[in-house]
Image (cartoon, grey):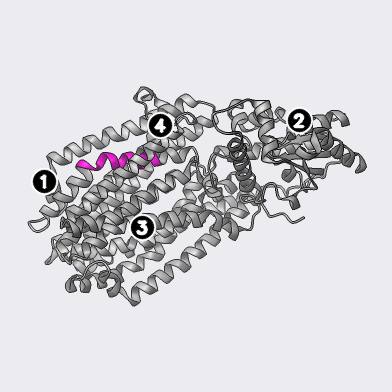
Amino acid sequence: MTKNNELFTSMPVGKAVAKLAIPTVVSQIIVILYSLADTFFIGQIGDPNQIAALSITFPIYTLLTAVANLFGIGANSVIARSLGQNDESTARKASSFSFWGSLGVTLVLSILLAIFMQPILLFFGADEFTLGFTTDYLFWVFVIGGIPTVAGLVLGHLVRSVGKTKEAGVGLTIGGVMNIILDPIFIFVFHMDVAGAAVATMLSNAISMVYFFVVLAKMRKATVITISPRQFSLERKVSWGTLSVGFPAAIAVLLLSVSISLMNGLLLKHENGNILSAAYGVTSKCGTIALHISIGIAQGVMPLIGYSYGAKDHKRVHEVCRLSFIILLIFSVMFLVVVQLVPGPIVRLFINHEQTIEVGSVFMRCWSWCVIGMSLFNMYNSIFQAVGKWKTSLFLAVLRLGVIFSVLCLVLDALFGVSGLMWVQAITDTVTCFIAFLLYTRFKASIVKEFTKQPVAEPVPVTSNRIIAICREFGSGGRTIGKEVAAKLGIPCYDGELIGKIAAESGLAEAYVEKNAGYVEADTLYGSAVSGRDLDGQSVADKMWLAQKKVISDLANKESCVIVGRCADYILRDTADCLTVFIHASDEKRAERIVNVYGEREESPVQRLHDKDKKRKSFYKLYTGIDWGEADNYDVCLDSGKLGIDGCVSVIANLYQQGA
């Protein structure tokens, strides 16, 4: 019988990294396409002033993302922790606070921008050639479209907080696809130029928002997520709990906004400033490809690093980090080589203006030397986030864009002019990467020291007790079979009794453990792995799993018994004489049984069966790496629909006694 290893604890590092990082990179590619759409289609007009307008307005527009991160990411953490404590009231309040709080802040910003639009744009570098374009763009995407944009982003975070990562991803994809479709229509068909791109973006974000409203409407009876104003609360654990966690994410976006504004402002002061700004705009947009892919890899492995660090598996932390650095180094070198070889054609994809292409090619060659440092820096930063060192992560983010980038802009502009500005990003990321490396080296030395101080672990003793571990399809009667087998053999049966033990071991509420232990809310392996994680990189499900392993191992060491579900077959594979059994039956037989046992529900019995089994399968796959229900993974598989409850009990009891 061949069994794979656990995703988080012993699955080969390469496979585990691939399972977690690839979906994140794919989602980041969607973000890339979304962010490049406006620049690409506006560039086809061939007017550098309109490209420059996008560069000038970009830092202002990113304020919306900062607001969404402040409230959405913060609420995600509060909701996950509250659910683990069975505090559904706080979870509801956090979701309502984040939604209405973010809209309130956005409304204020939109009104201020509408009133002071011209002086703000002049401050950011707009001139007689770009002022009209920048005004049109910001009016549609911020003044009119600010609220739907932030609402969609925050709702995506809220939906993700309860494990619905598929729905969150669909919402993001809908917005990106609609923007790509609507951009050419409004820009070329309706001849609205840059205003058309703004209208397309505004409508795309509004469509995404409506999608999330529909998702919430469908979930309303089965989730704590709510946007009801009656649940809005300013209680400290709600408001401060949300804002304190979201603050670092918001600061990171704001610093990016400030850095782009500073660079644009300095470029616009030079001769042919609008062409320089357009070249920088194209360069920075192309740079988002490397940025988002490196972020996708770094954030994808965060749960794996956080889990391993929390479990004190420092060797695995090192292996995951080492492989991730190798992948990022290979990717960044390849990206650098491509840009160095063909910068002109890359710029030409975005704008067919010879002078801009010429300047942009030089700019891109200089800029691209930042890719290696930037990619590795993102990995270092994600490591610190994953292990709960958010202060170090925040320090690095502020140092990179808030200090080093800003100082270099001013100094290199004064010393070398435009040529100096072209090298700012490359020098910034190289320096900050080196600083991050030093901090990481210090951190790694500390965990190695801690690891070497720990006494060598004794081999896990193999208990002389004999265990029957019963896995079962929902409605197959596995619980009843387990209890009757235990009664016949005169040994205890543990099923519901495990709930209180797991709750006590994990520190989670017993009611929450009863409802969620052995299940995951997300619909995919990846969704389960990354949803609802706190600053330490662990989800509530992770904490339950670790507690579950300890409780079941302790029971097996204590006495012979029957254990129903809870992945006991896998947990005890190396430490006990364990008879593993899988109970199954046809949909018809199981549907008949659950109606008799649990009564009628709104959804069809068969749908209930499939939903329960899907969640059990996802949980089992996530924490063991094994396919739940595969015959090769069990000693015996029994069809309770054909053998009956008594027949299954007799077979299991006989097998147990024969092995005595």
Please say whether residue 193 is one of the residues in the magenta stretch: no
Q: CA distance from mark 4 to mark 3?
A: 28 Å
Q: Tell which circle, 3 or 1, labels the residue nearer the N-terminal end.
A: 3
- Boundaries of the magenta span: 144-156
Alpha-carbon neighbours of circle 1 within 10 Å: few (<14), some, or many (≥20)?
A: few
Q: Tell which circle, 2 or 4, labels the residue nearer the N-terminal end.
A: 4
Residue 79 in the image, given as x and y percentages of width and height: 46, 33
| CB contact under 8 Å: marks 3 and 2 | no
Please say whether residue 146 is one of the residues in the magenta stretch: yes
Q: Secondary structure at mark 2?
A: helix
The relative height of residue 621 versus residue 321 in the rendered view (above or below) is: above
The residue pinned by badge 3 equals: 32
Is 543 situated left or right of 242 in this image? right
Q: CA distance from mark 4 to mark 1?
A: 36 Å
Q: Amino acid at mark 4?
A: Ser
Q: CA distance from mark 2 to mark 4?
A: 40 Å
Q: Residue at x 54, y 39 (%)?
A: 521
Q: Secondary structure at mark 4?
A: helix
> Is the C terminus in the top left, top right, bottom left or bottom right quadrant?
top right
Q: Residue at x 20, y 41 (%)?
A: 144
The residue pinned by badge 4 equals: 95
Tell which tag, 2 or 4, sits nearer the viewer: 2
Magenta residues: mostly which secondary structure? helix
The residue pinned by badge 2 equals: 480
Can residue 439 be seen in the rendering of this structure?
A: no
The residue pinned by badge 1 equals: 119
Tell which tag, 4 or 1, sits nearer the viewer: 4
Q: CA distance from mark 3 to mark 1?
A: 31 Å
Q: Amino acid at mark 2?
A: Thr
